[in-house]
């Protein structure tokens, strides 16, 4: 989905989730329980396109959003694991240890750069709330502490938007039914 603007994609996904009447669910039989199991959700959005300002050449594309339930569950688990690893790495690095350099107030910029590096490495930017704290006193040698908390709203939004794929076609419904 790298070719499609993320903000637009998120809007379309939110529209799909809000429009439950047109959000189609795909089921398959579960041979163990004998019940139907939800495997995917599908939402189709027609988009009018034109290549000139006079709209002489226009057509309708069908944007089809598909969410795999199994892939969404796997992504949710991976997000939680990445959050845990990032949180653990940050907290451990700021614990004072013998023979290890301690982050101090005089090195706040380097400490912040380290935090950014960890968040980027673990792909959890925007999902954790980070606060570098000072101990008693304000000298440059005062050790820094760190408080790491989960941004539950951002995490839930990321999980909600996980596992969607976008397919676009100009094939009519008669040739490619929903």
Image (spheres, grey):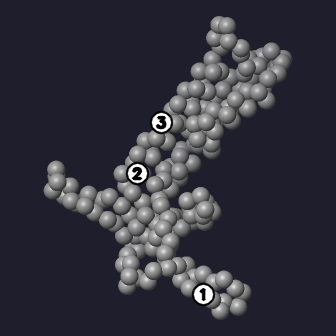
- Asked if residue 19 lies left or right of residue 11, the reply is left
Q: Does the image show residue 170?
A: yes
How far is the residue under mark 1 from the one under mark 2?
35 Å
Question: Mark 2 or mark 3, which has the lower sequence index?
Answer: 2
Q: Which residue is located at x 63 percent, y 39 percent?
A: 120
Percent position of residue 31, x then y: 17, 54
Q: Which residue is located at x 60 percent, y 81 percent?
A: 49
Which type of secondary structure does the marked residue at label 2 adopt?
helix
On the image, which quarter does residue 30 sit in?
bottom left
Q: Nearer the viewer, mark 1 or mark 2?
A: 1
Q: Which residue is located at x 55 percent, y 59 percent?
A: 1
Percent position of residue 108, x then y: 78, 27
Q: Nearer the viewer, mark 2 or mark 3?
A: 2
How far is the residue under mark 2 from the one under mark 3?
15 Å
Above or below for 129 versus 144: below
Q: Residues within 10 Å of mark 3 (few under 14, many from 20)?
A: few
How far is the residue under mark 1 from the one under mark 3?
46 Å
Q: Nearer the viewer, mark 1 or mark 3?
A: 1
Which type of secondary structure does the marked residue at label 1 adopt?
strand
Label annotation for residue 58: 1
Q: Does the image show residue 18?
A: no
Label annotation for residue 71: 2
Label annotation for residue 81: 3
Above or below for 173 versus 121: below
């Amino acid at each position: 989905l790298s070719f499609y603007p993320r903000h637009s994609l998120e809007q379309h996904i939110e529209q799909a989730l809000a429009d439950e009447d047109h959000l189609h669910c795909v089921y398959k039989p579960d041979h163990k329980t004998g019940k139907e199991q939800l495997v995917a959700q599908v939402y189709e959005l027609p988009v009018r396109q034109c290549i000139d300002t006079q709209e002489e050449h226009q057509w309708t594309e069908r944007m089809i959003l598909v969410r795999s339930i199994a892939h969404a569950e796997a992504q949710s688990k991976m997000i939680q694991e990445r959050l845990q690893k990032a949180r653990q790495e940050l907290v451990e690095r700021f614990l004072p240890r013998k023979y290890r350099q301690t982050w101090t107030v005089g090195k706040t910029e380097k400490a912040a750069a380290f935090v950014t590096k960890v968040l980027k490495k673990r792909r959890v930017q925007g999902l954790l709330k980070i606060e570098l704290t000072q101990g008693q006193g304000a000298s440059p040698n005062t050790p820094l502490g760190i408080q790491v908390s989960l941004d539950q709203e951002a995490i839930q939004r990321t999980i909600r938007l996980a596992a969607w794929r976008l397919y676009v076609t100009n094939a009519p419904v008669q040739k490619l039914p929903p």
